[in-house]
């Protein structure tokens, strides 16, 4: 029974990583888009363009959202590795925790510096938090199977 649950958690992580890839991809597109994004403009408080075109939207020449695409692809690949592979499981957790910290920092910037939120970014933040929690649960369940 535990193995089936762990397999399902791996597929849920994969699905969340796919959502993260799509959200980050849309954000990359919007980063370079010349016109305003009308589906994500709800005034000053929720405005993706204010966030996605700010000075905090890139590290050097690389858009933060592009880093998100690559990160989510990496997490997706790790989620498909056999669940009893201890190195892959630990790497999935470590990578997800680092990504959650980075995403939390970006959300902090939205709240305390830009005073504007991006709904796409918040969706990505929710995805990475869930991936982190599920990766930890999956790892713990896998350990129970081994012992």
Image (cartoon, rainbow, N blue to C red):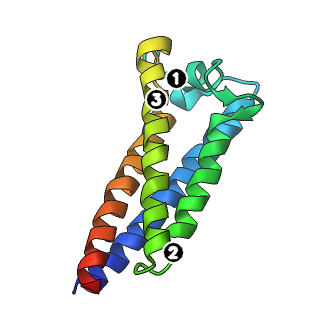
Q: Residue at x 63, y 50 (%)?
A: 69
Q: Residues within 10 Å of mark 1 (few under 14, many from 20)?
A: some
Q: Which residue is mark 2?
A: 80
Residue 44 visible at all: no
For numbered disc 1, what is the local secondary structure?
loop
> Contact, CB < 8 Å: mark 1 with mark 3?
no
Image quadrant in which the C terminus is located: bottom left
Residue at image location 41% in from the left, 19% down from the top: 111
Q: Which residue position holds label 3?
A: 105
User: Residue 85 at x, y = what percent?
Assistant: 45, 78
SS class, disc 3: helix
Q: Quadrant of the N terminus?
A: bottom left
Residue at (59% x, 52% y) in the render: 71
Location of residue 10 by image quarter: bottom left
Tell me residue 137's x, y (percent).
28, 65
Please state the total of marks drawn on the protein image.
3
Q: Is residue 38 visible?
A: yes
What residue does disc 1 label? 41
Instruction: Tell me where residue 74 sits by quadrant.
Output: bottom right
Which circle's residue, 1 or 3, is located before the other in the chain? 1
């Amino acid at each position: 029974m535990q193995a089936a649950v762990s397999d399902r958690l791996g597929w849920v992580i994969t699905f969340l990583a796919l959502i993260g890839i799509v959200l980050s991809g849309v954000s990359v597109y919007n980063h370079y888009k010349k016109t305003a994004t009308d589906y994500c403009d709800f005034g000053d408080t929720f405005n993706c363009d204010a966030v996605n075109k700010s000075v905090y939207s890139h590290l050097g020449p690389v858009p933060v959202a592009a880093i998100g695409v690559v990160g989510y692809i990496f997490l997706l690949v790790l989620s498909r590795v056999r669940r009893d592979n201890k190195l892959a499981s630990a790497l999935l957790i470590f990578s997800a925790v680092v990504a959650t910290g980075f995403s939390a920092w970006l959300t902090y910037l939205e709240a305390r510096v830009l005073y504007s939120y991006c709904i796409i970014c918040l969706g990505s933040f929710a995805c990475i938090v869930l991936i982190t929690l599920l990766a930890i649960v999956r790892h713990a369940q896998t350990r129970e199977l081994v012992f």
